[in-house]
Amino acid sequence: MTTEFTGDPLDNLAQSLRAAIASEVERALQAKPEFAKVLSVMEVAEVLHVSETTVRNLIREGTLPARHVRGRTVVRRADLERYLEGAA
């Protein structure tokens, strides 16, 4: 089966990857009810399949909003979902 691309193949690939990642993240969030309101840096890294350092870089750059609560950095689920929508 051959797939025909309309437009730039790299744009098509990027769009497909974003959709797959968004789907995977949504599945992970639904499978783990403890992710309901806020996530730790480690949990965000797990959901996004990236390192904690990458998550901290996104937070430091202001790309991913976070808050500090009792000495912990947390990301609200709603902020993570908005980040993913913006990346799509």
Image (cartoon, helix red, strand yellow):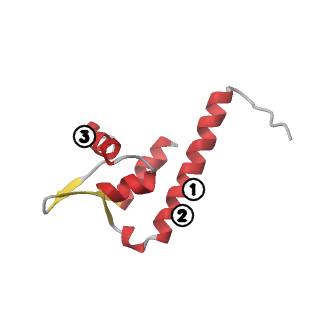
What is the x, y in percent for residue 11?
Answer: 62, 31
Identity of the residue furthest to the top in this view: 8
**CB-based contact (under 8 Å), mark 1 and mark 3:** no
Please, what secondary structure does the residue beneath circle 3 have? helix
Going by the numbered disc 1, the residue's amino acid type is Ser
Label 3: how many residues lie within 10 Å, few (<14), some (14-19) or many (20+)? few
Going by the numbered disc 2, the residue's amino acid type is Arg
Of the two numbered discs 3 and 2 on the same chain, state the one appearing first in sequence: 2
Q: Name the residue under label 3.
A: 60
Q: Mark 1 points at which residue?
A: 23
Nearer to me, 86 or 27:
27
Give the total of numbered labels. 3
What is the x, y in percent for residue 4?
Answer: 80, 33
Going by the numbered disc 3, the residue's amino acid type is Arg
Of the two numbered discs 1 and 3 on the same chain, state the one appearing first in sequence: 1
Please, what secondary structure does the residue beneath circle 1 have? helix
Please, what secondary structure does the residue beneath circle 2 have? helix
Q: Residue at x 50, y 57 (%)?
A: 25
Q: Name the residue under label 2.
A: 27
- Left or right: 71 in relation to 83: left
Nearer to me, 26 or 44:
44
**CB-based contact (under 8 Å), mark 2 and mark 1:** yes
Mark-to-mark CA distance, 1 and 3: 26 Å
Mark-to-mark CA distance, 2 and 1: 6 Å
